[in-house]
Image: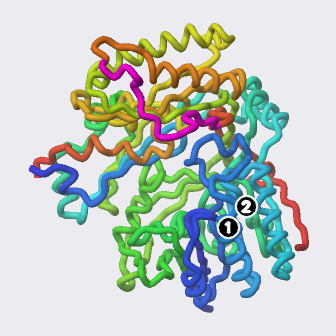
């Protein structure tokens, strides 16, 4: 077992335009990326649960060439709107850090 | 015949973020065909488009612009800057154009300059709505005349075509309003006879300067683009590009890592290869381009949402922290009564308590709900519709009641809040919100972006 905070090279969030948030989890090489992919833990349902969004609103894409997983879903509030807490969206990654990967 | 290639130097991620002079000199020594930089982003939020000001300081923008003008004019190559002034509206472009003229006058530089406008007049947008040529993005509602009328400013995001026209007409300095970030670079590549796939991909690398390198930083990136690949290398010897650093960059700020929607088509990176050509340069190949059946221009617009006033405070009292929600409810009720008494009805303002140490960063998405912090920080916020004066008046009541409102078990009877500043209250000014995030169908990619030329 390994937490994402220990197993990943990158775990980050950022706006993808003013209405969407995108999260990337990147691994060191093809070997660990394939092992993580095989566990199925990183999937739309995980992001739906961690970020309280309907699963059908999560665009989830593994990107083999970068050993990366990307998930994109609506922001809680559009960037800069009343109640937005993170205009750039770059501090929304933390709930992923403690996800346990059975690798 | 030698293979077609073009050599491009990007100085930084944003005009005004800065770059080492030595990195620019090292890049110029490699004889680029064009230099440039991205001038803006939508990321800093709706305020800058609305208020007509840049998110980098004019002092920092001028520093970068002066160095780049000297480099380009000295070498006899074009200097191209997209999304001038941060948001690309008319006042943003005016600011950077005025700076270029001043620097030229002060330093004795002469050049032909093109200014490409991207701010859209409301009547033309309404004509497009009537013709059914505007479509929403990101699940936004259909655009209506009422929203257009309410909007403070609307810009269109240009593709490479206006840049190509300006360069074809002999402009040496091209300053543009809102632009797709890769567009100036894609324009240079396509003009050089290179295919759109490497042209757009090169633009994606160059628009962030040395961001695709490690250590990541605001610095210069040199990209050589050929028929079916490109090579990326930072000019600062302290940085290097690796296959992983380059691959990671294609994840940046896009909803999909493999399908990148651009004004005239889609860049597909699913078949990309990233190969090291040295310990600090990477060759990228395998990208493809699918032209869109309809050329579209993205529109960004903002409207005034009110006027903001804020106050920063903190508490170290465990008795208050233990019953924070009911305390904030009491304060909210006090504010409603007192603000209504001087003319601020509850439906004319929004009052927010941002609680740092609890859920100030993630709000409703914060999963940690059972932690008891020993201190918490507050940003007390009012956005009022009527005026700055009224927003500040409501905030004043909120601040006073955060300080003095009683709560059961209270021992700290002199005050609940530690204020770090005097004055405690800050007038933030007008607040904008995104109102337009749509695409417009166009027959000619240049039709929304008039170009003016001048000899400087």
Q: Earlier in the sequence, mark 2 or mark 1?
A: 2
CA gap between label 2 and label 1 equals 7 Å
Q: Is residue B286 left or right of residue A2?
A: right
User: Which residue was labeled with disc 2?
Assistant: B161
Residue B197, quarter of picture? bottom right
**The disc numbered 1 marks a residue on which chain?**
B
Question: Element under label 2?
Answer: helix
**What segment is highlighted magenta in the picture?**
B411-428
Position of residue B105 in the picture relative to residue A6 (left or right): right
Kindly identify the residue that appears in the image at 45 percent across and 19 percent down: B404
Residue B187's mark? 1
Q: Residues within 10 Å of mark 2 (few under 14, many from 20)?
A: many
* Frontmost residue, B101 versus A14: B101
Give the residue drawn at x 44%, y 72%: B285
- Quarter of the image holding residue A18? top right
**Quadrant where the N terminus of chain B is found in the figure:** bottom right
Subunit of label 2: B
Q: Is residue B223 visible?
A: no
> Is B129 left, or right, of B338 in this rendering?
right
**At x 26% / y 34%, what residue is drawn?**
B374
Residues at marks 2 and 1 on the same chain:
yes
Looking at the rendering, in which quadrant would you find the C terminus of chain B?
bottom right
User: What main secondary structure does the magenta stretch of the protein show?
Assistant: loop
Q: Position of residue B113 (x, y in %)?
A: 83, 70
Whether B219 is among the magenta residues is no
Position of residue B446 measured from the top left corner of the image (x, y, whole percent):
78, 55
Where is B162 relative to B139, above or below? below
Residue B263 position, x and y percent, is 63, 52
Reply above or below: B154 against B36.
above
Asked where in the image residue B67 lies, by quadrant, the reply is bottom right
Q: Secondary structure at mark 1?
A: helix
């Amino acid at each position: 077992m390994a937490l994402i905070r220990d197993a990943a090279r990158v775990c980050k969030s950022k706006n993808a335009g003013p209405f969407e948030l995108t999260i990337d989890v990147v691994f060191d090489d093809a070997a660990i990326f394939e092992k993580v992919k095989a566990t199925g833990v990183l999937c739309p349902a995980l992001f739906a649960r961690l970020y309280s969004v309907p699963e059908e609103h999560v665009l989830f894409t593994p990107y083999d060439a970068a050993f990366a997983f990307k998930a994109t879903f609506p922001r809680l509030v559009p960037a800069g709107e009343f109640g937005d807490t993170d205009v750039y969206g770059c501090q929304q990654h933390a709930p992923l850090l403690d996800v346990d990967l059975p690798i | 015949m030698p293979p077609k290639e073009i050599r491009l130097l990007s100085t930084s991620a944003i005009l005004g973020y800065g770059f080492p002079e030595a990195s620019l000199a090292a890049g110029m020594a490699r004889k680029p065909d064009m230099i440039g930089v991205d001038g803006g982003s939508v990321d800093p939020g709706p305020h800058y488009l609305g208020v007509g000001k840049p998110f980098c300081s004019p002092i920092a923008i001028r520093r970068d612009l002066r160095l780049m003008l000297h480099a380009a004019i000295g070498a006899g190559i074009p200097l191209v800057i997209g999304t001038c002034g941060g948001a690309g509206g008319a006042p943003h472009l005016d600011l950077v154009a005025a700076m270029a003229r001043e620097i030229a006058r002060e330093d004795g530089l002469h050049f032909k300059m093109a200014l490409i406008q991207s701010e859209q007049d409301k009547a033309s947008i309404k004509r497009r709505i009537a013709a059914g040529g505007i479509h929403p993005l990101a699940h936004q509602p259909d655009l209506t005349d009422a929203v257009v009328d309410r909007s403070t400013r609307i810009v269109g995001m240009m593709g490479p075509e206006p840049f190509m026209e300006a360069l074809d007409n002999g402009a040496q300095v091209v300053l543009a309003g809102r632009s797709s970030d890769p567009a100036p670079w894609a324009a240079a590549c396509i003009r050089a006879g290179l295919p759109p796939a490497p042209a757009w991909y090169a633009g994606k690398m160059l628009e962030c300067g040395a961001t695709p390198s490690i250590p990541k930083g605001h610095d210069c990136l040199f990209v050589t683009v050929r028929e079916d690949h490109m090579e990326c290398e930072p000019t600062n010897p302290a940085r290097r590009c690796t296959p992983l650093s380059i691959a990671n960059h294609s994840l940046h700020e896009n909803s999909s890592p493999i399908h990148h929607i651009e004004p005239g088509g889609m860049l597909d990176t699913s078949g990309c290869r990233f190969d090291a050509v040295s310990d600090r340069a990477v060759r990228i190949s395998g990208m493809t381009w699918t032209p869109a059946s309809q050329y579209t221009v993205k529109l960004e617009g903002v409207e005034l949402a009110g006027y903001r006033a804020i106050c920063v405070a903190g508490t170290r009292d465990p008795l208050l922290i233990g019953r924070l929600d009911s305390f904030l409810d009491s304060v909210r009720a006090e504010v409603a009564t007192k603000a209504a008494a001087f003319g601020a009805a509850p439906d004319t303002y929004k009052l927010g308590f941002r609680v740092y140490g609890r859920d100030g960063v993630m709000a409703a998405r914060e999963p940690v709900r059972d932690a008891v912090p020993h201190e918490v920080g507050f940003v007390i916020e009012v956005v009022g519709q009527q005026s700055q004066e009224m927003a500040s008046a409501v905030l004043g009541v909120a601040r006073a009641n955060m300080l003095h409102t009683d709560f059961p078990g209270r021992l700290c009877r002199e005050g609940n809040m530690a204020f770090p500043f005097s004055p405690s209250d800050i007038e933030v000014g007008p607040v904008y919100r995104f109102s337009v995030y749509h695409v417009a169908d166009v027959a000619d990619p240049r039709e929304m972006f008039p170009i003016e030329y001048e000899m400087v």
